[in-house]
């Protein structure tokens, strides 16, 4: 199973913005390998959430752990049968451990998106 976590510039904290996160941590639960990739959607003029969602779909992610997610991105992720969980705190490693222990809750609220606003 592949888990994704959007990361801040320090490459260890969960980014508050899913679509504009500078990096994404990919964690393979079977091999225990981690890979941090630049998020190609981070500097998008618009539609960053949709582009980030497609990036995860292309990487065959099964689970996203994030602080928040826009409605349009969530629809893409859910159509790909990806589970979305709400991060607890900001440390990515702690959130991966919490997920493995069944301590994370599914993210149930999706915002309308920022659509060009900060």
Image (cartoon, rainbow, N blue to C red):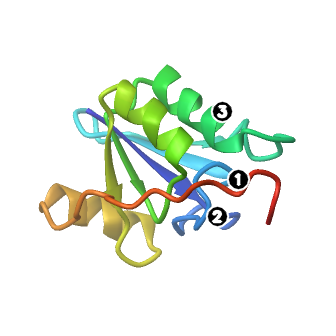
Q: In which quarter of the image is the N terminus?
A: top left
- Between residues 22 and 69, which one lies in front from this camera angle? 69
- Between residues 38 and 30, which one lies in front from this camera angle? 38
Left or right: residue 44 compared with residue 111: right
> How many other residues sit within 10 Å of disc 2, few (<14), some (14-19) or many (≥20)?
many
What number is the disc on residue 22?
1
- Between residues 52 and 30, which one lies in front from this camera angle? 52
Could you tell me which residue is drawn at 54 percent across and 69 percent down?
13
Sequence order check, earlier mark of 3 and 2: 2
Say what secondary structure mark 2 lies in: loop
Disc 1 from disc 2: Cα separation: 6 Å
Residue at the extreme front: 112
Residue 54 appears at what percent x and percent y?
56, 27
Residue designated by label 3: 51
Residue at the extreme bottom: 89
What number is the disc on residue 8?
2
Say what secondary structure mark 3 lies in: helix
Say what secondary structure mark 1 lies in: loop
Could you tell me which residue is drawn at 72 percent across and 38 percent down?
47
Could you tell me which residue is drawn at 22 percent across and 63 percent down?
105
Q: Is residue 16 above or below residue 65?
A: below
Give yes or no for contact between labels 3 and 2 (Cβ–Cβ under 8 Å). no
How many discs appear?
3
């Amino acid at each position: 199973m592949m888990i994704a976590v959007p990361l801040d510039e320090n490459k260890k904290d969960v980014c508050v913005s899913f679509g504009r996160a500078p990096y994404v941590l990919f964690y393979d639960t079977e091999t225990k390998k981690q890979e941090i990739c630049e998020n190609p959607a981070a500097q998008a003029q618009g539609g960053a959430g949709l582009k980030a969602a497609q990036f995860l779909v292309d990487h065959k992610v099964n689970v996203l752990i994030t602080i928040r997610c826009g409605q349009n991105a969530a629809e893409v992720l859910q159509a790909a049968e990806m589970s979305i969980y709400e991060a607890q705190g900001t440390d990515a490693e702690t959130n991966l451990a919490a997920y493995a222990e069944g301590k994370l809750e599914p993210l149930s609220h999706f915002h309308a998106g920022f659509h060009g606003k900060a």
